[in-house]
Image (spheres, rainbow, N blue to C red):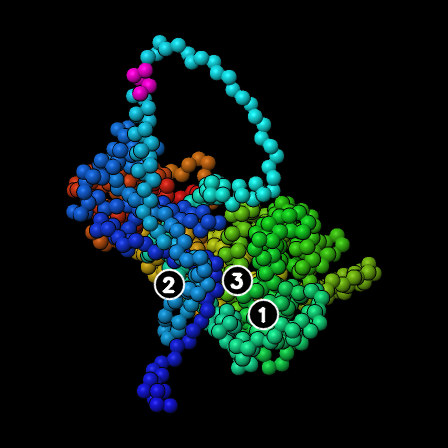
Amino acid sequence: MANEEDDPIIQEIDVFLARSLLEKLYLFQYPIRPASMTYDDVTHLSAKIKPKQQKVELEMAIDTLNPNYCRSKGEQIALNVDGTCTDETSTYSSKLMDKQTFCSSQAASNVSRYAAAVYKKGELHLTPLHGILQLRPSFTYLDKADAKHREREAANEGGDSSQDEAEDDVKQITVRFSRPETEQARQRRVQSYEFLQKRQAEEHWVHLHYYGLRDSRSEHERQYLFSQGHGLAENTELIKSPSEYLMMLMPPSIEEENEKPMAPSNVLSMAQLRTLPLADQIKILMKNVKVMPFANLLGLLGSGTDPTAVLRCVQQVALLVQGNWVVKSDVLYPKDTSSPHSGVPAEVLCRGRDFVMWKFTQDRWVVRKEVAAVTKLCPEDVKDFLEHMSVARINKGWEFMLPYDEDFVKKHPDIVQRQQMLWMGIQAKLEKVYNLLKEHLTPKKQEAQSAHPLLVSGEQRVNMAKAKVKQNFGQLEKEFQRQKAEMKSNDSSAKPDVANIRIKEEPVSVEEPMDTSAHEGLNNGLVNGLHPAQGPLDPVNGHLPGGCIDRVAQELKAFVSSTFKKQFVLTLSELKRLFNLHLASLPPGHTLFSGISDKMLQDMVLDTGCKQILVPFPPQTAASPDELKVYALWEAGDTYDQHRQVLLEIFSKNYRVRRNVIQSQLSQECGEDLNKQEVDRVLKDCCVSYGGMWYLKGTVQS
């Protein structure tokens, strides 16, 4: 007790386990930097990785203008490596050692005890590390210099020998045939150092895109270091009841476990299920049932279960389709598995099933032939996808198996909106993978189908048509009598002055809504389970009120202005992606949810002082039309405006440029010798480096 009083608890901190970057997060340990290189502002020229070996190679620039840099030594090294000739194969194109390569090695074989921690607002978020890599300088350029030196010596020796020498005498050779390799010999050969080196060398390098510390992609990825579920969905390992904690400290003996009868693998015991954590219960239920309304899920979990906790957990393993929850594809097809029918890997199966789920967010009906034509999968795999979530109807196609859950949509509009943003991201990925056409993106216009189709006989249809005609006839007769009475009253009154009559003209909008609009192109009037009538704003005759238009313009202008002041250069595709992320962070009912068209967004970009840069893309480019539109902030109001304008003029004539060309052009146009830090600042604002060349942001075609 005395020790506890001397050491009181000052603060209790909640600990959360983040799983978004599980098996993806690596820790790089850089060596002590030399005086001519700073890692906080270093330029990464290129990066590549061998995933199986967890081997990384980074190429970084050296500040050759630093007073600690020995220029004569750098020139000598470049001369030894490349010789006097310079071409595209040269290691140092500037005839100076201006870059250094770092190769990685594993610092620890077992990293399960290590995690990256982020502390924010009284919460500690932990993400397990997948690997710890130490980066060390690579001296392969010295091997290249030695190889050239040996080539020169061999050439000199060959020149001294007389060319008039007679040919060597013919020598007798003995041909031998190798004996069959035994199993022991094969095992020794496989375990040898030469064989392992050969296997490692056969793995191809995968080139990576490097994003700086202040890049929007980096800021977006850093958000994954925080727990998305805030303690309930992803942190079941950290939340244990006293009995569960005691079970972890003192697990039952192996004999007791063996005595329990094992149930078949395809049988799910509800008694055993309720002993598991909530997240595992929901995952097992969704994996077995595949499609389920939220009310049914709550009923299976038993009374007393918190609906809020269930909502947080179900979003980790399922997606919302027409107000119902459908299990995610990666839960059914885990990594490193394949199709039992065709042997297709799990990644391809997940893409195909996501396409089927996305089609059901657009319409209640899906045609099997269309799915097979787009996904290029075998008929058995496509049939499995459809049987998971739909029912076959003769001469109609496949109908989603559950009716639209309007009650859930009305009670949880925030969940519906979040799921809608997720489907927009999935749709963007599917468009790139499958090259979807407009006919695939736009659902077919057909009459609204009821949840349970009715069979109506011919006689009943005739009677219904007669009743409808009688009803319409009565209404038309009443309208005719009313108009006739009005005409008589108008004839008795004075004739109005036709010249003073003015017809009100309504403005006609011809703008096509951008794909961030949540109220276009979906069948049966629903947007992933959300009816347009529940939108945040009510248009008047198809147009927004005047005051609302001003508020939308102000909000949109503020977003565009702040975004370009951070990024300077953006493609239309990247701008729309950032705008979607911005919409996802806004509260329900915000003015920007009224629908922003492509034309409105591009006009606002030009109104905020930006210009469109006509980059000459290669003729064989696979970029989408939105990726071909590049916009840049022309005047930011700082001292680098002129430098950026010169840089943008260069890229309006060239798709990719070398650094030395950019530096010489900047010095020529600005009339002064720029140091390396100033050039780096301008390049970081507008460009990215890939494979030793510089591109405008967002224009790199891998």
Give the distance between the C-alpha atoms of the residues marked 2 and 1, in whole angstroms: 42 Å
Q: Residue at x 71, y 72 (%)?
A: 261
Marks counted in the figure total 3
Q: In the image, what residue occupies the spot 53% across and 55% down?
A: 426
Q: Which residues fall within the magenta stretch?
A: 157-161
Disc nearer the start of the sequence (1/3): 1
Type of residue at label 2?
Glu
- Tell me the quadrant of the picture where the C terminus can be found: top left
Disc 3 designates what residue? 420
Residue 544 falls in image quadrant = bottom left
Instruction: From the top left corner, tell me how far across and down residue 101 is, in percent.
Output: 33, 45
Spot the residue most to the bottom. 1
Can residue 412 be seen from the camera position used here? Answer: no
Three-letter amino acid code of the residue under disc 1: Asp
Which of the two discs, 2 and 3, sits closer to the camera?
Answer: 3
Between residue 638 and residue 453, name the one nearer to us: 638
Q: Nearer the viewer, residue 568 or 329?
A: 329
Relative to 344, say whether 543 is above or below: below
Give left or right: position of 420 versus 687: right
Q: Quadrant of the N terminus?
A: bottom left
Q: Which residue is mark 2?
A: 555
